[in-house]
Amino acid sequence: MNGETGEPARAPHAAACPFCSLLCDDLIVEQAGGRVRVLKNGCGRAISGFENPDGPNQPRLKGKPATIEQCIERAAAILRGARFPLFAGLGTDVGGMRAVLSLAERTGGALDHMHGNALQRNIGVLQGTGWMTTTLTELKNRADLIIFAGTDAVSAHPRFFERLVWNQASLFQLDSNARQIIYLGAGLNTKPGRSPEGRKPLHVRFDPPHLVEIVSALRALAAGYRLQAASIAGVRIPVLNSIVEKMKAARYGVLAWSSAELDYPHAELAVEACVELVKDLNDTTRFSGLPLGGNDGAITAISVCAWQTSFPLRTAFAAGYPAHDAHRYSTGHLVASRSADAVVWISAFRAAPPPAAKPLVVLGAPNTHCPEEPDVFIPVAIPGLDHAAQLVRLDSVVSLYLERQRTSPLPSVAHLLTEIQNAL
Ligand code: SF4
């Protein structure tokens, strides 16, 4: 029995991890004395997430301790007085996101995720041209060539290679040791790309903002054009030609990018170039794209929004029905222009700082540092650790149920938002 919470200890058992969008479901954890311990298969981020003790659980009104009921009443009063509230951050689970949508519809508010800029780089291309993408399962079981364009995958998803690239078992007897790995870009951690037998990946270095030129050159070469240049962004043409040969020889190639890491002006052009290269290669072989990223519940948030409104995030209910506008309804624009006259910031997985906005309601991880004390701060439970949760995986095709792993006094985002809506 747990002496602090009265909760019975739990013997080692399987658990899924909520701390990045890979949602690894092979962790072994145990719970004793109210603390969770990761015994097997957790990366550093998972261990720190699961094993961190609960933070301070005191709700606050303008920095002063308050009851949760007082905080709910104050948050409801702020929303009652707002003409156009913004629900931002959106680091929550399916239940929390459903509650966000309900409250946004009731109050005529707008929705955007803390990774809204990165999401929009992909969404704009998907809306404009369409894309051909694959799933993690297909990658794991079929890919014989994986190209990482401007990303190393492991900075955002630490176990990417362990789980999906150098896996020993595969459905179709694929020899994962024989996979070819290519990195495009600089500043990447390429060590995980070395095969278990010691084969080094090919790493083509150039300044990250030149990715669009490199991928466009690969497209031109793959289409049979000759380039009137000795090099592109410092990469010699024969090197690019050798990559084209590998892509054409692949039986199932995958081109992965992370729009969060393509953080420079007009980076959506690089995403578009990747997407179009994949389409071109399918004239002669099988090739797919794989957009990485989507941590902090971003894939869950955008999925739930699409299920319920048919639109991605950056959707608002101001007109009484959902309307999407990628620029007007971005957090940056709504806060800077003060078009939003109240902000509700949600970040349940980690302490992500809210924007400087007034009035501000924060439903955040207990240790959230706010540059200025918000009008309302309520510490919330972590989905998949402090309460059972459903989350959507990186590839958007699988949603996982994550069990509660410990008892926490903190409320879930779904519970709080429902209470706030009831108090309107
Ligand atoms: S890679 Fe991501 S999902 Fe997997 S254990 Fe690490 S943090 Fe958790």
Image (cartoon, rainbow, N blue to C red):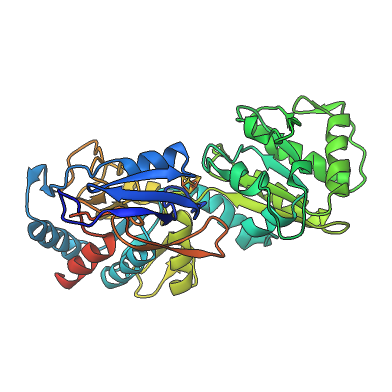
Residue 267 location (% of width, % of height)? 60, 42
Nearest to the observer: residue 217 or residue 328: 217
Residue 231 location (% of width, % of height)? 83, 27
Q: Residue at x 26, y 53 (%)?
A: 9
Residue 81 location (% of width, % of height)? 16, 62
Q: Residue at x 67, y 32 (%)?
A: 185
Q: Is residue 4 left or right of residue 24?
A: left
Q: Is residue 316 left or right of residue 194?
A: left
Q: Residue at x 70, y 33 (%)?
A: 194
User: Looking at the figure, which quarter contains the C terminus?
Assistant: bottom left
Q: Is residue 370 above or below residue 207?
A: below
User: Looking at the figure, which quarter contains the N terminus?
Assistant: bottom left
Q: Is residue 277 left or right of residue 230?
A: left
Nearest to the observer: residue 119 or residue 402: 402
Q: Is residue 368 left or right of residue 393?
A: left
> What is the total number of numbered labels drawn onto the structure image?
0
Q: Residue at x 21, y 61 (%)?
A: 82
Nearest to the observer: residue 267 or residue 63: 63
Residue 370 location (% of width, % of height)? 24, 39
Q: Is residue 205 above or below residue 76?
A: above
Using the rendered image of the protein, determine whether residue 102 is visible from the camera's viewpoint.
yes
Q: Is residue 412 above or below residue 59?
A: below
Using the rendered image of the protein, determine whether residue 135 is visible from the camera's viewpoint.
no
